[in-house]
Image: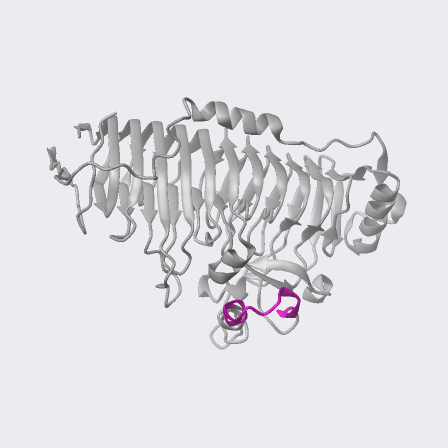
Amino acid sequence: MNLIKFNYKVLIICLLLGGFYSCKNNSEEKETAAVENSEITDPWDEADGIIKNITVPTFPDTNFNVQDYGAVADGTTNNSQAFADAIAACSEDGGGKVIVPSGKYLTGPIHLKSNVNFHLEDGAEILFSTNKSDYLPVVHTSYEGMEMMDYSPLIYAYQQENIAVTGKGTFNGQAGNDNWWPWSGAERYGYKEGDQNQRDEHNLPRLSKMVEDGVAVEDRIFGEGHQFRPTFFEPFECSNVLIKDVKFINAPFWVMHPIKSNNVTVDGVTVESHGPNNDGCNPEYSKNVHIKNCLFDTGDDCIAIKSGRDNDGRRVGIKSENIIVEDCIMKDGHGGVVMGSEISGGVSNVFVRNCEMNSPNLDRAIRIKTNTRRGGTIENIYVKNIEVGQVKEAVLKINTHYAIYDNQEGEFMPVIRNIYLEDINVENGGEYGILIRGREESPVANVNLTNVHIKNAETPLLVENAEEISFENVTINGKKITN
């Protein structure tokens, strides 16, 4: 495989009307730690091995109908206690299935226990309360990669094992411009000038300062009087988690957020939620995650892999790894499969295959975002057999200068290496085909494109501070890219 090495401070490769400017590094060839996966003959065998070893929970054939515990499907009666009683009875009996029959059920947060499959029958819809006090007392949770004590997630499990939410029903977070979303501070989501929001001094700045100062998580108390939106489904420090067939709509914040969890399967799930930060699935500090057969139509990233923000990510020190995404459809979203920006603990061994990504409102297909406050090592990313209809900005975007907040420069140089894209077909490549912005002190290393064909990209390639880019049978706008 031929390699091109780039170590200029800025290199821009542009194809305009058929012109291609090829640049090669004249410096001496040298070995790099980036090529540490050379012993793997087929990474997809490794992916199959990870899937084979993921424990998918099974449950005793015992049913607990929530209506037997007082649940009423009228859309107005609060069923929090009935749901809690059914879950407790199921868990105490050794496990089984908590059944929610067809109908509309209003509830506060649902807290799962070990060995419980919370199952929505076809036609069942869970309506989550719009009364914020229902989500108190505070629980151990997280916001944008920083742990804290805050409002309960809508569905929550803490240090449990063998848990599931399944069935053909719908979880409706009832978030909107009149509930939860205005706290984002964005006018298009209902925020009005003068209202309190997450950016106020007593919210994100206070939490960020606590993280910087090393305040213990149990002392980072928020909840009432603060404006942090809860995640929708959050298994926290759990093992053997299954999310299957259900539908999530109208989420306050991130939709599925397995954090510090192991053996997570997301199968056949539909996410249709276009609110602020409505990421579809965010594995964080999590290992052995299999996301398959899902539909993501979101207000933010379809899938975003996380591992903590700044000092909190370094304090926890757990990377997300062994994550497989396959046979999924990505529609609207900031990115199809994304790593970052809360990535300080690092990410490795991500496999994406057999997916469709297509929407005029999908910004990027594959994205990696970090900076020198986040740092982190992002490595061994494999993408294969992806059909992209349309993206706005780029098919592949790697950015080590990511900034949505002020002061995003620090002392933690990110490392990005071993990126493989293979068998990718793109009809409309957007503003850029490939967009890479590394750092002079830490160039993006060992990027490989094989059988990648991108049409209708305004600027085919923009590469800054990257080494070891390999092209094999790559065309952009019909022109072959050669080394």
Q: Is residue 230 left or right of residue 406?
A: right
Residue 335 is at least partly visible in this image: no
* In the rendered image, the vertical position of residue 368 relative to residue 178, given as above or below: above
| Residue 96 rendering spot, x and y as whole percentages | 81, 36
Q: Which residues are magenta?
A: 208-223
* Left or right placement of residue 389 versus residue 57 in this view: left
Q: Is residue 458 magenta?
A: no
The residue sitting at 22% across, 40% down in the picture is: 461
Q: Quadrant of the N terminus?
A: top left
Q: Where in the figure is residue 103, as x and y percent of width and height?
A: 75, 43
Q: Position of residue 436 (x, y in %)?
A: 28, 45
Q: Is residue 219 above or below residue 84?
A: below
Indicate the quadrant where residue 358 lies: top left
Above-or-below relation of 21 to 153: above
Pick the quarter of the image with the C terminus. Answer: top left
The location of residue 376, given as percent across then percent down, is 42, 51
Q: How many marks?
A: 0
Residue at left 64%, top 70%? Answer: 219
State how the image is colored.
one colour
Q: Is residue 25 visible?
A: yes
Q: Is residue 443 left or right of residue 407?
A: left
Residue visible at 41% across and 47% down in the picture: 377
Occupied quadrant, residue 479: top left
From this view, report whether residue 301 is shown above or below residue 184. above
Q: Is residue 215 magenta?
A: yes
| Foreground pick, 251 / 12 | 12
| Occupied quadrant, residue 266 | top right
Q: Nearer the viewer, residue 175 or 343?
A: 343
Residue at the location (20% across, 45% down)? 7
